[in-house]
Amino acid sequence: MSKRVDFARAQQQVDDGISTFQQSSLQVGYLRRSAEAARGALRIGTEQYEQGLRISRPC
């Protein structure tokens, strides 16, 4: 193989690595937002459940 082909292959690997890193960074952001939404849903569900218990129980 010529040095030109080796360089082209190395450059492609670098570009692929950068692209993979960028995609992973985006995915981390999506996963963070998803986890925050899940925590919020859990909090709301827990509050509604607890309020339902208070309403349905005679004092």
Image: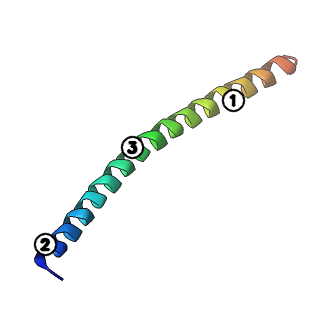
Nearer-the-camera pick, 43 or 3 = 3
Name the quadrant of the N terminus.
bottom left
Quadrant position of residue 42: top right
Of badges 3 and 2, nearer the viewer stands 2
Q: Label 2 is placed on what type of residue?
A: Arg
First in sequence: mark 1 vs mark 2: 2
Residue 41 position within the rendered picture, expressed as x and y whole percent measured from the top left: 62, 31
Residue drawn where x is 88% and y is 17% of the image: 58
16 horizontally vs 1: left or right = right
Q: For the residue labelled by badge 2, is the local secondary structure a helix, a strand or a loop? A: helix
- Number of other residues with Cα within 10 Å of mark 2, as a class: few under 14, some 14 to 19, many 20 or more: few
Find disc 2 in the rendering and name its residue.
4
Residue 7 position within the rendered picture, expressed as x and y whole percent measured from the top left: 15, 70
Q: Are marks 3 and 2 in contact (CB under 8 Å)?
A: no
24 shown above or below 47: below
Q: Label 3 is placed on what type of residue?
A: Leu
12 shown above or below 30: below
First in sequence: mark 1 vs mark 3: 3
Residue drawn where x is 72% and y is 24% of the image: 48
First in sequence: mark 3 vs mark 2: 2
Q: CA distance from mark 1 to mark 2?
A: 61 Å
Q: Label 1 is placed on what type of residue?
A: Gly
31 shown above or below 52: below
Q: CA distance from mark 1 to mark 3?
A: 29 Å
Residue 56 position within the rendered picture, expressed as x and y whole percent measured from the top left: 86, 20
Find disc 3 in the rendering and name its residue.
26
Q: What is the number of callouts on the image?
A: 3
Find disc 1 in the rendering and name its residue.
45
